[in-house]
Amino acid sequence: MEIERKFTIKELPEALEKYPCKLLEQAYLNVNPVVRIRREDDTYYLTYKGSGMLAREEYNLPLNEESYFHLLPKADGNIIRKKRYLIPCEPYTIELDIFEDSFAGLKIAEVEFPTEEEANHFIPPEWFDQDVTFDRRYHNSNLSQSKPDFTK
């Protein structure tokens, strides 16, 4: 079960370069239910996500590089590329995604929680802006199907 809140951000945190960063590329084979392939640096996954906004089922299966590149041309819509910074926010980790290519300008912070109660009581840091957990436009599966303008 994945329990996660998503936020837009007002400004990047200071000294962003000091935090661990991963390069992500993901593409969607299906959006209902979500079936995605992801490259995370040199690691590859196939992911299934159930329905839901705050909480939903999620299963990750390992892929090898050959399988990933075999499936990539079968994906529908946009391939999403982003840098993910891992920022401690005890006892959680903020995953700050800075999107690239056609979604440049979009910055989303995600925080995962062990329970819905903790998610509902989370007080975001000052540099967070709007809570977009329940706004489907900010789900990567929806971004893969359109090109909204997030550069404002």
Image: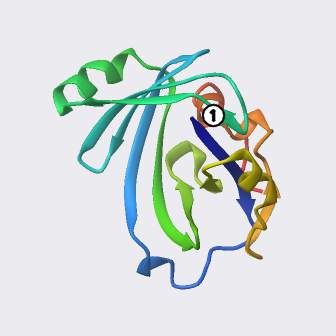
- Of residue 136 and residue 124, the one placed in the foreground of this image is 124
Q: Is residue 139 above or below residue 8?
A: above
Q: Secondary structure at mark 1?
A: helix
Q: Say if residue 72 shows up in the picture.
A: yes
- Apparent side of residue 19 relative to residue 33 in the rendered image (left or right): left
Q: Is residue 79 above or below residue 152?
A: above
* Residue, far bottom: 15
Task: Give the labeled residue for mark 1.
Answer: 143
Q: Which residue is at a point 58% across and 84% down the rendered structure image?
A: 14
| Total labels drawn | 1
* Amino acid type, residue under disc 1 in the picture: Leu
Pick the quarter of the image with the C terminus.
bottom right
x and y, in percent, of residue 95 in the image: 54, 59
- Apparent side of residue 115 relative to residue 44 in the rendered image (left or right): right
Mark 1 closeness class: few <14, some 14–19, many ≥20 residues within 10 Å: some
Q: Is residue 146 above or below residue 16?
A: above
- Apparent side of residue 69 relative to residue 27 in the rendered image (left or right): left
Q: Say if residue 151 shows up in the picture.
A: no
- Of residue 129 and residue 78, the one placed in the foreground of this image is 129
